[in-house]
Image: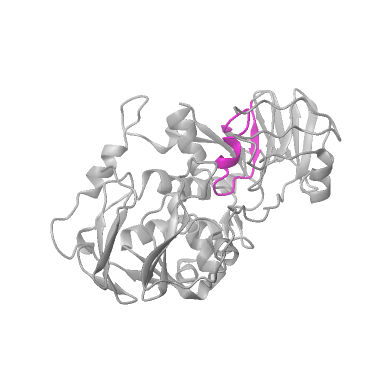
Amino acid sequence: MRPQAPGRSVLGRYVRHWAEDESQKATLVSSYDEYAQGGYLMNVMPVKGLVHKLARGGVLVETSAGPLQFGAVPETIKDTMLTAGGVPAIYVVGDRLFSTKHGISLADLEFPIYFNFFAQRRKTICVCQPSQKRVIAAIMREAVLGPRKVDVSTEIAAGPVPKLADEIAYFRRNPLAGNPLEFEDMLEFLLFDRTGRAKLAGVEIQRGSDGQFSVKDSGELIAQFPMELPVPAALEETHVRVAPFHPPAFGITFIGTGHGFDPNTMTSGFVIWVNHRGILVDPPVNSTEWFKKEEINPKLIDAIILTHCHADHDGGTLQKILSEGRIKVYTTPTIMGSFVHKYRQLVGLSRRHFDALFDFVPISICEPIRIHGGEFYFHYTLHSIPCVGFEVFWGGKSFVYTSDTLY
């Protein structure tokens, strides 16, 4: 069944749910009362459009300038892809860029940027404070375009040195103009002024001294709610374990099998078991909650392999690090450099304090490294940013993971 547009609503009236099929849970709020009781919105005025609470966190406000999204948690695009208005082009950032409680970004614009630029042929607009612009720009530039300088010659133990800089340049072509893609082609900023006000196309957003966001459309107040937007509990896929979990000597447990634009499934990530010990590969967001639900002891998993720094692969890595304490992270120095560049600024830590959160184990290309007795061989892939795949051997068996690659 195709999504249907909701009816107009005023205070206390129900907003109709819609989804791809009847089995899906609606991603939007069912009523104003639900908003108020959950503490998500306060003093919502009668509106021209609608105000929605997104399932993964954040608020969507319909205006004459298009939908405005307040807050952007990881995978937020999976909520808005199901709405009648589609993925917004305008995102408003709250006071905080990172939730220490949940271990996630509150300004994760990466996949909305991709969708708006490549699918909608438009820029994404980020409305934020001047002090936040530098951090958001640095994080998104690293994620979208990769590191400014790439030299992996010291990471190659055998064989030819891949020309990653040339390969990245191949992907960095603007499909609209044919010239090299610049970060400014995809994202622009609208900054709150000294009075805490930002305006665009007849819509005014005000950061109040009372800790409230106010939205006016053509001079009329249409919405008001806290700048400190809560993050709901992790979404879960339905599954019931019928027997206790016993990790295999060598095997795979899939956490998610979807991609970053799939609204119906958890983003891909998995555990590879070697000698009954787990290695988490590109952990999805909220993977720790998934382990609890599946009754898999997280203490069985003491290592992470990070293949690259796109949000659908690294989005849950820092969250896992913060939730489990010290853990070993295996990747190349180049990829670790991007990870540190993205997330150190997000959490506001010095390099020394950030590095102290986990144990980085650098890998060399084409040189075996043993993890839990398995023999791992890593290689760089052909991707838009530095990315590795691997092959692992144990007990006469093997497993290959290409990660993201053009081939």
Looking at this view, name the residue that lies furthest to the front: 242
Q: Give the prevailing secondary structure in the magenta stretch.
A: loop
Q: In this view, does 57 lie to the left or right of 41?
A: left
Q: Which of 70 and 394 is in front in this view?
A: 394
What residue is drawn where x is 83% and y is 29%?
A: 10
Q: In this view, does 138 lie to the left or right of 403?
A: right
Looking at this view, name the residue that lies furthest to the right: 12
Of the 4 image quadrants, the one containing the N terminus is top right
Numbered disc total: 0
Q: Nearer the viewer, residue 65 or 306?
A: 306
Bounds of the magenta span? 66-89
- Residue 15 position, x and y percent, is 77, 33
Q: In the figure, 47 relative to 55: above or below?
A: above
- Residue 209 position, x and y percent, is 78, 47
Q: Residue 152 in magenta?
A: no
- Residue 139 position, x and y percent, is 47, 50
Q: Is residue 25 left or right of residue 375?
A: right
What residue is drawn where x is 48% and y is 43%?
A: 110
- Residue 388 position, x and y percent, is 30, 56
Asked if residue 74 shows in the view, the reply is: yes
Q: Which picture quadrant has residue 13?
A: top right
Q: Residue 79 in magenta?
A: yes
